[in-house]
Image: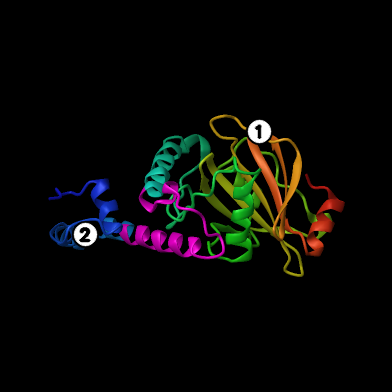
Amino acid sequence: MISLPPSERDLHAYVDHQLSDADRRVLESWLASHPDEAAQIRAWQRDAQQLRAALSGALQQPANPALDPTLIRQRRQRQSRRHLASAAVLLIAVSIGGFSGWQARELTWARPSQLPMTDALQAYRLIAQQGLLPADYKVNSDGDMQRWLDRYFTRAGRLPDLKAAGFEPVSGRLLSTDEGPAAMVVYEDGNGHKVSFYVRPPGPKNTLLPRGSRSDGDLQADYWSGPGYNYAMVSPTDSPAAQLLKQSQPF
């Protein structure tokens, strides 16, 4: 029998349909008089549905306990608490109302130790190609993508300048990986071609990457490491964008 107010474990169990009928009724009655907690539960339910939809598409993966929605939410909340604790320094005070910060619509990618920057390629497919995950930030007339990125990655290098190739940054997305928080910035040219800039920490083992390039299906990833972070530029191999990027050498 659950106790009231419910614990975090009870709330996760409710979202994942793991409560008994009696406990579920007790919790639903309590949520009816606590609108803030009820709104959080609805957001978690949307996250779980989005995660299942994303993983049922082209990126089918073997069973992976790291993709369990409960574990993802718990990891996200631990990260959120750490960043909120240093908000005065890092200016991290957003949630995604979703998920700006490290909350709500996160996705845990396959471990990049398989091949360099596998997570960057997966992020491009889900976000830039398939549009399965919405942007956290979109550039408008007053927008500044560099300032948005600096809020979360204070020691990262500057965004690549791809103007010579005709590309401008248009949107950004925060992600969670096994190596730590990551971000992807989508660039677009006047013809709708898209490339992405991806940044994440090297992980607890400080796995820095040599400068390199590899293809994965219809995509190419050019990757490297800088102070404190690993980076990748991802572009379709069969579009004019790839050749233009090579000529402009942004990385």
* Left or right: 32, with 108 as reference point: left
Q: Which residues, given as a range, are shown in magenta?
A: 41-70
Q: Residue furthest front?
A: 62
Going by the numbered disc 2, the residue's amino acid type is Leu
Q: Residue furthest right?
A: 247
Q: Is residue 139 visible?
A: yes
* Left or right: 246, with 51 as reference point: right
Asked whether residue 65 is drawn in magenta, I would say: yes
What colouring method underlies this structural image?
rainbow
- Vertical placement of residue 180 versus 167, above or below: above
Q: Give the quadrant of residue 206.
A: top right
Residue drawn at point x = 63 percent, y = 64 percent: 129
Taking depth in this image into account, of 5 and 12 the one nearest to the observer is 12
Instruction: Point out the frontmost of discs 2 and 1.
Output: 1
Taking depth in this image into account, of 49 and 164 the one nearest to the observer is 49
Neighbour tally class for label 1: few under 14, some 14-19, many 20 plus, Cα within 10 Å: some
Q: Main secondary structure of the magenta part?
A: helix
Q: Give the quadrant of residue 126.
A: bottom right
| Disc 2, SS | helix
Residue on which disc 2 sits:
31
Residue drawn at point x = 83 percent, y = 48 percent: 249
